[in-house]
Amino acid sequence: MIERYTRPEMARIWSDEYKFSQWLRVEIAACEAWGELGVIPAEDVAKIRHASFKMDRINQVMAETHHDVTAFLRSVQESLGEEGRWVHYGLTSNDVWDTALSLQLIEAIDLLDAGIGALIDVLDRQARTHKHTLQVGRTHGVHAEPITFGLKLALWGQEMRRNRLRLSQARASVAVGKLSGAVGTFATVPPTIEASVCRKLGLEAAPVSNQILQRDRHAHVATTLAICGGSLEKFATEIRGLQRTEVLEAEEPFSEGQTGSSAMPHKRNPELCERVCGQARLLRGFSVAALENQALWHERDISHSSAERIVLVDGTTLLDYMLHLFTGVMDDLRVYPENMQRNLDLTQGLVFSQRVLTTLIERGLHRQEAYKAVQDAAMQSWREHTPFADLLWAKPVVQEKLSRAELEALFDYTYYTRHVDEVFTRAGLD
């Protein structure tokens, strides 16, 4: 991932140096396990624990071998004496690669989990703040009925909780290791070695493997990243819509000295939210590549390797950045309740059409007759920009069922917010 979209904590996890350090953890744990079986002498194991590698040496050997594991092993063995012959004993490359990759993914996922937690906290705070901030609900982009802005944000918080659960499940799926040898038969490395190494590293041993850990596990991670990115895109798209000049109900932060256009000094664009939306598209693309990586030839090929060096690294890095960015947007979101009320009043009462309809039905009017009367008045209100209540009152069928005072009483915004407290209780936000 480019530096602009990379945060230091995630960059550390995916650096080459850290990757090789995890490979070394696996190699040392394997040697310790062989030592427990009495295959590697105790004095050799003690020396192997102090093994190291040099990045410049790995790069130098890589230029010759074109194989990062053999380059790594040569550097490690050069840091040791005769005992270095035991390093990688009985193992194949993916015993080390896949097990270490799981360790890196776990750390990356834990960092993402913290990011989701931070966003949930901000969403919950803003939801409580705007619990009763009236806003028009829109369907198809058109005014529907009143809601509160807090309900919208409570909805987002619940979605991020589901993403957090999905991420936890993906973590469990990939928190496994394998040290089963070249095609998974344990011919050169017994199951006891795998069990010992995985236990020391805090991983589960894959019950069955071939030469690699199966890539449905990694696809689970990548698709989860994409779903989470899709949620962020949905939220960001909403902010973008609410920031339109003619709406202006909410606005992402705009700092002192910031510019929105090189040509138009007045511009305040939702560029942060637009950035989130664009990056979500990348995550979806990464997930497709991860799904394609599931189908490999026989017990293993490396067609997946080149793709996942990008999609797993960049996917976790990008989502980490997106979470941080959007949390900042929501933490300092500018909300304009007065504009929400203005927009709510734009249609001169049309948002109350369903309540009028149901009341007429309750008073004994047939549904089709009631619907026609209300819709006719509504369509006239649209055309003529005339108060909806006045047009309703002009209809004899309405006067037969309601007094003017009763009709006016139906135009009450609090009717639509009377269950907000209950919803917040159900969401754990009371």
Image: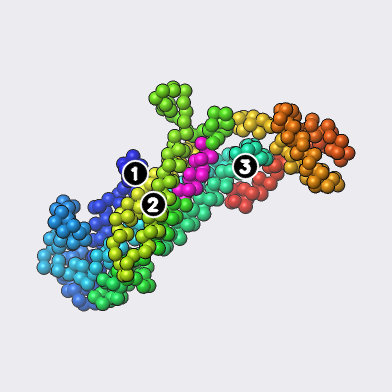
Identified at 30% across, 69% down, the residue is 211
Q: Where 201 falls versus 331 (above or below)? A: below
For the record, the magenta segment spans 228-240
Identified at 73% across, 38% down, the residue is 352
Amino acid type, label 2: Phe
Identified at 70% across, 32% down, the residue is 382
Give x and y (percent) for residue 40: 18, 73
Whether residue 336 sits left or right of residue 198 in the image: it is right
- Is residue 42 at least partly visible in the picture? yes
Q: Where 282 falls versus 40 (above or below)? A: above
Mark 3 neighbour density, 10 Å: few (under 14) some (14–19) many (20 or more): few
Tag of residue 286:
2
Is label 1 in a helix, a strand or a loop?
loop
* Residue 274 vs residue 29, the one in the foreground: 274
* Residue 385 vs residue 274, the one in the foreground: 385
* Residue 429 vs residue 207, the one in the foreground: 207
Is label 3 in a helix, a strand or a loop?
strand
Instruction: Name the residue furthest right.
Output: 400
Mark 2 neighbour density, 10 Å: few (under 14) some (14–19) many (20 or more): many
Identified at 12% across, 60% down, the residue is 78
- Tell me which corner region of the image, top left, top right, bottom left or bottom right, holds residue 194: bottom left
Mark 1 neighbour density, 10 Å: few (under 14) some (14–19) many (20 or more): some
Disc 2/disc 3 C-alpha distance (Å) = 31 Å
Give x and y (percent) for residue 307: 32, 55
Amino acid type, label 3: Thr
Amino acid type, label 1: Thr
Give x and y (percent) for residue 92: 24, 68
Residue indicated by mark 3 = 139
Q: Are marks 1 and 2 in contact (CB under 8 Å)?
A: no
Magenta stretch holds residue 247 = no
Labels 2 and 3: the sequence-earlier one: 3
Residue indicated by mark 1 = 6
